[in-house]
Amino acid sequence: MKKRCITSALLLCFVALGCSQNGIRPMSRVGASLRRSAESRRLPSMGQRWLASLASRNGRERVELIDLSNDTPVPLNGINQADSQTISLSVSGDGQRIALVRQREERTELMLYRRNASALQRLPINPPGVPRSVSLNGNGRLLAVQVSRRGRWDVDLIRLP
């Protein structure tokens, strides 16, 4: 019994040491680049080689898309508006679509941004409800939306054209 306890303790120490040396760590090159380009970031969403997030600079938050193959921001003309605040976002696998929920003038809206057209489009929710969180599938054609209706949370799946 005593020998088994010592063996188990040694095995546990080796596993702990192995995990601490080869554990999960941020990618230093990408992480450093992201920290330099914004004061803070939140709401990350990953595509194949894309990172969408809310980047904060000088007290203002903006939706940003980073091409991870070269660590550069991609222009998102028309997605960021001074009178709105993004609550949730999700990027498609190819980085061409960004779904978001935003608060604007006392309304909560579900939006879809198409990068190839620089177009931001409001998506209707039927039956009516208040969107809270979004998630695009890899090809950007199916959208899951958390919606509040009459005090209850639902998840709607929306097929996009």
Image: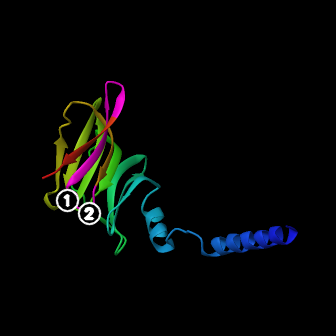
Q: Tag 1's secondary structure?
A: helix
Residue 22 image-quadrant placement: bottom right
**Amino acid found under the numbered disc labelled 1:** Arg
Does residue 22 appear left or right of residue 147 in this picture? right
Q: Mark 1 or mark 2: name the one nearer the start of the chain.
A: 2
Per the image, label 2 sits on a secondary structure element best described as loop
Q: Which residue is mark 2?
A: 95
Extent of the magenta region: 137-153
Q: Amino acid at mark 2?
A: Gly
Percent of width and height locating residue 159: 18, 49
Which residue position holds label 1?
A: 115
In the rendered view, tell whether residue 86 sits above or below residue 28.
Answer: above
Residue under the image location 66 percent in, 71 percent down? 20
Q: Please, which residue is most extreme toward the front here?
A: 1
Residue 143 within the segment the image draws in magenta: yes
**50 with respect to 119 (left or right):** right
Pick whichever, 66 or 1, lies toward us.
Answer: 1
Between 96 and 145, the residue placed more toward the observer is: 145
Number of marks in the image? 2
Q: Is 103 rendered above or below residue 117? A: above
Q: Residue at x 76, y 69 (%)?
A: 8
Q: Residue furthest top?
A: 150
Report the Cα–Cα distance between label 1 and label 2: 8 Å
Vertical relation: 152 (above or below) 29: above
